[in-house]
Amino acid sequence: MTSAAHESMFTASVHDDDVVRVLGTDGTLDARNDPGLSPEEVVHLYRHMVLTRLVDDRLVTLQRQGRIGFHIGSLGEEAAIIGSAYALRKQDWLFPCYREFGAALLRGMPLERYLDNMFGNANDPVKGRQMPDHYTCKAAQFGSVSSPIGTQITQAVGFAWAAKIQKQDLVALTYFGEGATSSNEFHNGLNFAGVFKTPTVFICRNNGWAISVPTERQTASRTFAEKGIAYGVPSVRVDGNDLFAVIAVTRDAIRRASAGEGSTLIEAITYRMGGHSTSDDPTRYRDKSLLDPWADRDPLARIKRYLDKQGWFTDAEEQKLRTEIDARLRDLVEASEKTPPPSLESMFEDVYAEQPWHLREQCAELLAGPRAPSAHH
Ligand SMILES: Cc1ncc(C[n+]2csc(CCOP(=O)(O)OP(=O)(O)O)c2C)c(N)n1
């Protein structure tokens, strides 16, 4: 694992026809790159993918009912997100984009806190100061959600560089969409990572769209992975709807980073099956027929076919799981929705160790001022 001579198994795969794949769409397995998960691990990850999808469904419904303001989901991208997060070691850190709540939950963020963020209530980890789906979880080593495109890329590189200077064996993994490869931060981050061999894993979720911009309008490069080669960053294309392949390539990238061999760019080829967010209507710019080829590659259905073949998770167990998650979500949503908003004075916290006089004065004035009636009283 720490051998400086470790060679990546996958780094040649940057071209169109060169994609790492383990799990066939029919549920068969190619043993060559199989990460060798136990039956318990596969079932655990499948259950988590189902949870993620049901959370997505529920949040879209809540937004449509006007109970939360916004949601940005991961429909169709679950394997790319959960597989890569699963490959991380405990000490590693994650610098998210905005679609990776499944990774935060997998790494130990309580579902309660995530839902509190959706309602911006008093238990929201960011105290209601941000939009829904902008959270953080230090205990899960999950940085703050970055919605300005690409900013998390340079944060991850800086973090990894600091770890390298301090001789800590940790890797910073960052997620971004293929649209972010057109940002300055992508250039700055990959260039720096290439020169200084920082222990960073770049996961480019190539989901076909940057809101309404399709990949062919995003770049004239043949692939997104080949952009890494220009920076001297070994790169690989992987079937992002194949949980096993994503785990295998991410583990390999982590091994290389941990061995001092620097960063890897992983292009995970997947598809955004839903809108960009609940504020978007993809039927305005995307023909429905474009979804058809991807339905067959659905990351959850694919694992389920494999589980069926192995006899590891029955339809009855699946039904039971879905019923349990539904009930749990109903209870947790009810609790989060009932929780009052953060206190007004919390707005003045967290900047100064000792609050300066003018903020104390402003806070007192605010508390004494007229209030609109609160929905919670
Ligand atoms: C600097 C900046 N410009 C524009 C936006 C508006 N915006 C939000 S998401 C997005 C598209 C991002 O696409 P991509 O990077 O492919 O990620 P995806 O949403 O597909 O996961 C845009 C243009 C932004 N958040 N930040």
Image: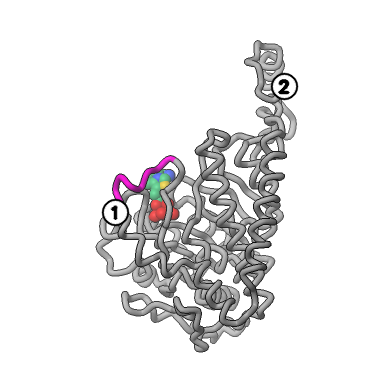
Residue 301 at what x, y percent from top left? 51, 69
The quarter of the rendered structure image containing the N terminus is: bottom right
Q: Which residue is mark 2?
A: 377
Q: Secondary structure at mark 2?
A: loop
**What secondary structure characterizes most of the magenta part?**
loop
**Of the pair 4 and 368, the residue shown nearer to us:** 368
Instruction: Please determine whether, in this image, residue 210 is positioned above or below residue 128.
Output: below
> Percent from the top left, x then y, of residue 143?
60, 52
Q: Which mark is residue 138?
A: none
Question: Left of 111 or right of it: where is 284?
Answer: left
Residue 172 falls inside the magenta stretch: no
> How many discs appear?
2
Residue at the (65%, 77%) spot, across then down: 312
CA–CA distance in space, label 2 to label 1: 46 Å
Asked whether 107 or 31 is in front, the reply is: 31
Relative to residue 18, is residue 226 depicted above or below? Answer: above
- Location of residue 217 by image quarter: bottom left
Q: Position of residue 95 (x, y in %)?
A: 56, 56
**Looking at the image, which residue is at 46% across and 57% down?**
176
Crowding at dot 2, Cα within 10 Å, few <14 / some 14-19 / many 20+, comes out as few
Within 10 Å of disc 1 (Cα), the crowding (few <14, some 14-19, many 20+) is few
* Label 1 sits on residue: 287
**Residue found at the very far bottom of the displayed protein:** 32
Image quadrant of residue 308?
bottom right
**Which is more toward the observer, 107 or 23?**
23
Coloring scheme of the render? one colour
Highlighted magenta segment, given as a residue range = 279-286
Say if residue 228 shows up in the picture. yes
Amino acid type of disc 2?
Answer: His
Q: Amino acid at mark 1?
A: Asp
Nearest to N terminus: mark 2 or mark 1: 1
